[in-house]
Image (cartoon, rainbow, N blue to C red):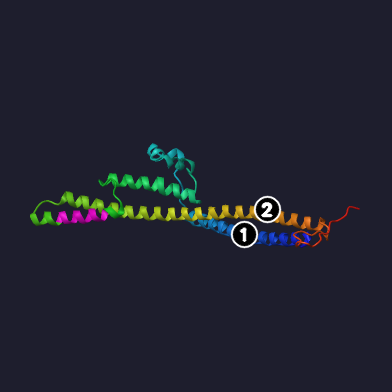
Amino acid sequence: MKRRTLDITLAGGGLLVALLLLALGFAAFGQYSFAQNYVKEELSAQKIVFTPADKLTAEETSWKAGSTCLVTYGGQLMETGPQAECYAKYYIALHMEKSAIASGFPGATYATLGSIRTDLSAQIAAAKTKGDTTADLQKSLDSATSLRTTMQTGETLRGLLLTVFGFSVLGSMAGLAASLVFALAGVMLLLAIAGFVHAFVTPKDKVIFAPAGQPVTVPVPV
């Protein structure tokens, strides 16, 4: 086989791979752009603004290690996935916890409040049967009912914001993949160009991998 033929074949294959990688890279970058734009449009439409940093309480800024993000995003309009995660995990979650404590049900969630309400209703029914007062039990039931509504709203918003965050993460991964694929495409393109250059600077009659017994033509320097 002539060396030039081999070089052109390999370079052509490399060029084809580079083109395929470029197409894949553009597809991944398209997904990245879509995810970022979609997240920004949907979040900004909600018009959620972070509490200014100077108006945050000490508890809000130190509740958990990640709570400092509330200071970082203080006063900003929510537009990105990381902002959505911060608001859901460290602002809404804190205030839901405080609401549960203030209502007399520390650690309660929407799910657990269902059984609490059922138990209180049973206690009220039993007390009425015995002729006992039910004022305190009714007050607790009313608090549990109100808290459950608050929890439902809070947990729904948290879930939606965290879902948006997850979507933004997938978009960022697509952007990273696009960058890597573009880099690989660039390397393959350079190798293909080098192959074509080598092919046309190689003498036409240079042969490699010649069968045994077949003379190999070696160019003679002029």
Quarter where residue 213 is shown: bottom right
Tell me where residue 5 appears, x and y as whole percent: 77, 62
**Which residue appears at 82% of the width and 55% of the height?**
201
Q: Residues within 10 Å of mark 1 (few under 14, many from 20)?
A: some
Q: Quadrant of the N terminus?
A: bottom right
For residue 35, side relative to residue 159 (left or right): right
Discs 2, 1 touching: Cβ within 8 Å: no
For residue 158, side relative to residue 146 (left or right): right
Q: Nearer the viewer, residue 154 or 219?
A: 219
* 32 in the magenta segment: no
Q: Nearer the viewer, residue 57 or 82?
A: 82
- SS class, disc 2: helix
Tell me where residue 157 appears, x and y as whole percent: 40, 54
Q: Nearer the viewer, residue 198 or 31?
A: 198
Residue at mark 1: 26
**Which residue appears at 59% of the width and 61% of the height?**
27
Gap in Å between the C-alphas at discs 2 and 1?
A: 16 Å
- SS class, disc 1: helix
Q: Residues within 10 Å of mark 2 (few under 14, many from 20)?
A: some
Label drawn at residue 187: 2
Magenta part, dominant SS: helix
Label drawn at residue 176: none
| Residue type (three-letter) at the residue carrying disc 2 | Val
Q: Closer to the N terminus: mark 2 or mark 1?
A: 1
Give the extent of the magenta segment.
113-124
